[in-house]
Image (cartoon, helix red, strand yellow):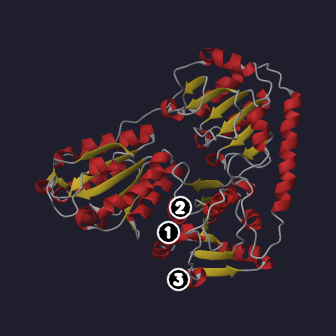
Amino acid sequence: MGKTVAEVILDQLSYYGVKRIYGVTGDTIIGLLDALAKQDKIQFIAVKHESVAAFMASAEAKLTGKLAVCTSTMGPGATNLLNGLGDAYADRAPVLALTGQAPLNKIGTDFQQYVDQQELFKPFATYSANLASEDAIVELLQKATQISLQQRAVTHLSIPKDLFEKETQVEARPLPKVIEGAETFQSEDLTEVASLMKTAKSPMILAGAGAWKANEAVISLSELWGAGIITSFGGKGLFEETTPYLLQGIGEGGNPHASEAFKEADVVLLAGVSWWPEGYVPEKARIIQIDTHIESASSGIPVEIAIKGKTEQVIPLLQKAITGYEPNTEWLNRIEQIKIKWANENEQEGKITDHPLHPSRIVRAIERSVAEDAILTIDTGDVTVWMNRNFRQSKQTILFSGYWRSMGFGLPAAIAAKMEKPDKQVIAIVGDGGLEMTLADLLTATRYNLDITVIVFNNGALQMESDKIQAAGLKEEGTDLTNPDFVKVAEACSWTAFGVEEEGELESAIQNAIRTAGPSLVNVLTAQAFFPETE
């Protein structure tokens, strides 16, 4: 006897190492849920809203680099996935979305909740297909999965409700094993790049999330080439604070003096990053970029030479190619002076005493309290820029909504991270506005008894938007929040919760929350501090 389409889907996904599927139960996917309930290889993670399911899949894929899966019913369920899939699309996370669809004989009709899902998912999905025959399921799944993994992309399959329970004779089969070797170019292919690098008197390296396997090589190249290192927020966790010539980030957050040096650079190497923050960048620098997706990565950046490849494979070749180059000691002294200047200022900012508590002071307490290998999931908003500015990382992993920049990412990402890395300390750092967008999923952490901690910067406002409105000289509307008592809400969801109003309570509350078994929340009364880099 054959297996049902739903059973084959789970067999196929288990070949890819998928451990869980995030989603909300719905009518058109009950066949898939039935199959999930009858096996124990893949766990169904029931959440409160489909956007949270997609955020969780995106966070898992960012954390592991492997395929992550979310699911929903048709119509409103499918549309709810889109925000989280937008995050995966923007940050190149390999995510597969499986959605239920109308029965085969109702596709294209006025059937309730019907929408052409291939058109609906087109802005985010590199590949989207509708299953039209039970015997095509393995072929479509393999194609979707290969595209997701090879291109680090979102893919999507819609499956008619009646096909989930149909039997098929096709069998799941593993993907071909891909052996990743060196890129096709050799050191001599980089002669022109090396020649350009050797002309530099004030070189800089801008590193991002795409350099996560190359951090040691970037440090070595920086020392050999005499280059300062700055990072996008995606590169925040790549280098320890003590790394020589590391100036941290620029733009909204990060080292406020780093842009001074960056604007003076004459040659810039972009390593695994496609971010080019206008207003903070050099106007006349010659730019080299390394990226696996150079066609899209170079868009909007005045790149002179682009290298299509993996950063961890290209950087060692560049090191070899510029052997013998003599760094400019005056430039290195300039970099070191800026590093020391900001280190002193950052230290002082972390000591600000204020009531309510200043964001910099809260960041310093977090820095002192978390494990050096903790996973920090950071929501979008004012909390993002203060963490980028003041947090001095050691070896923490940082997850955030990069190019999509959606509020509501922090809590779902923490839930997914803890499920994937149960032995790691996981801390979600969120603003009150961001948490309110996903507040119902406190119950998801309760349901699965997850040992995570959520730290809330509670300033009663959408502070980043408030700052921008004030900077523009405009009148505010809708930036003030109507907040619940987060401690009572958390406790009602069976969390352990701590309220902090005074500086003397801050570190102890965070540390007690982290030590607490099960989900815990720290609500910190936070000052509405105007962010100094706001324009």
**Residue at image mark 2:** 407
Q: Is residue 72 above or below residue 205?
A: below
Residue 510 point in image, percent of width and height: 70, 73
Image spot of residue 215 (x, y percent) = 67, 40
Mark 1: amino acid: Met
Q: Quadrant of residue 263?
A: top right
Q: CA distance from mark 3 to mark 1?
A: 19 Å
Comparing labels 3 and 1, the label whose residue is closer to the camera: 1
Report, in whole angstroms, how far the alpha carbon at label 3 lies from the one at label 2.
24 Å
Residue type at numbered disc 2 = Met
Tell me which residue sits at (65%, 29%) in the image.
Answer: 315
Quarter where residue 453 is shown:
bottom right
Check residue 437 in the rendering and tell me which mark sits there, or answer none.
Answer: 1
Q: Residue at x 26, y 45 (%)?
A: 129
In this image, 73 relative to 320: left or right?
left
Report if the CB atoms under discs 3 and 2 are less than 8 Å apart.
no
Q: Disc 3 marks which residue?
A: 494
Looking at the image, tell me whether mark 3 or mark 1 is earlier in sequence order: 1
For residue 89, above or below residue 412: above
Direction left: furthest residue: 105
Q: Earlier in the sequence, mark 3 or mark 2?
A: 2
Q: Are marks 1 and 2 in contact (CB under 8 Å)?
A: yes
The secondary element bearing badge 2 is classed as loop
Point 53% across, 66% down: residue: 411
